[in-house]
Amino acid sequence: MTNSTNLIYYEGGCYGTFVEWSCYYFSNLLKDIPFKKDGSSHEYLGNFLEPPEKLFEFISSKDEEQFARCHIGLFKNKQLSYYYNNKFYDICFEDLSFVNKNFKNILVLHPTTSTFLWMQNNVFQKCTFDDNTFKTWFEPYGYDKSYYAVNLKNNIEDKIKVFINQEMGEEKFLMWGKESIEDFEIWEFRELLSQYWFNRFKDSLTCWDDLSKDFRQIKFVSLNFFKEDPLNTIISYLNYFDIPTPPLDKLNNIIDQWKSKQIHMYKDDVVIEIINSIINKENLDWSNQNLTILDESYIQKVLMDKGIKLKCFGLNTFPTNTTDFLSILE
């Protein structure tokens, strides 16, 4: 028998917490605003069925909530290599086939090729918890700290290094003349990311059109919709869940509060503009754009793919305008 709970199934960094909270809020079941300084909605806990064992328990218990949410990878079985050894399409197809039989309505939130940096920066700057959260939520299900090590770090560089250590053997570091990732200078770390990081994701940004055709009864919402038209995007998923459209002033008030905190919302567009300014040698200053090491390494990668090489040695401080950047081109 299908559970009457509506499920939000989402990739990290794609606002699953915000969406669940907003469904309750615009149903007039919540009053508190959950936004933290980092732009997340993590003051709201809600019905987060993570790790996946919680989702299976929830189904078995016959408990019901109006809304709940879960991450991708329900059948990873504590294997860190799960995402790297499988196509994202296959992972999500298995997940969605399962939840589609067990929940009333399903909303999928996902990134795209033009919102990748937005999503990634969200993950690395907002998805953090402490030891107490780990012991309360994950340790009882048999997880050790190595599995959630990335969430226990507090800055983007340290979080990425967790993945690098998990995925690359020591011999790879030796190729750089280093014994570990901790020995890398910033310029070396950026160069490593430009060569490695962005080739990890296989079909994770492109599988969604096919999945939406396979599961036509499920609603798919990409980050592009939130960026281009947040008002009608929220209205569309509220209506999908049979929540009456709230007063527009109430909706716009929440959107204004939420959007003002999303510093990475247009990051993909900003980075494209920076790359084009370098290629076309047009004056541009991006010192106020809050670029992260991830953004910088992506710029370096795209330029490298176009045959434009940088004088990387010792470049620990990345240029913040076209004039300075052109001076480091080989």
Image (cartoon, grey):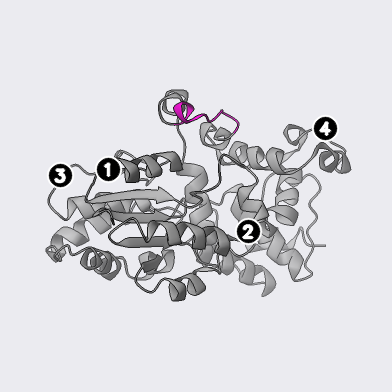
For label 1, the residue is 34
Q: Residue 76, position in %: x, y?
A: 55, 46
Q: Report if the CB atoms under discs 4 and 3 are less than 8 Å apart.
A: no
Q: Residue at x 77, y 67 (%)?
A: 308
- The answer to whether residue 314 is magenta is no
Q: State the CA–CA distance, disc 4 to disc 1.
A: 43 Å
Disc on the earlier residue, 4 or 3: 3
* Main SS of residues in magenta: loop
Residue type for callout 1: Pro
For label 2, the residue is 201
Q: Residue 55, position in %: x, y?
A: 38, 44
Q: Is residue 87 visible?
A: yes
Secondary structure beneath label 2? loop
Query: Mark 4 or 2, which is nearer the eye?
Result: 2
Residue type for callout 4: Glu
Secondary structure beneath label 1? loop
Q: State the CA–CA distance, disc 1 to disc 2.
A: 31 Å
Query: Mark 1 or 2, which is nearer the eye?
Result: 2
- Vertical relation: 299 (above or below) 157: below
Q: Which residues are magenta?
A: 138-146
Q: Could you classify mark 4 by the number of other residues whose Cα lies within 10 Å: few (under 14), some (14-19), or many (20 or more)?
A: some
Q: State the CA–CA distance, disc 2 to disc 3.
A: 38 Å
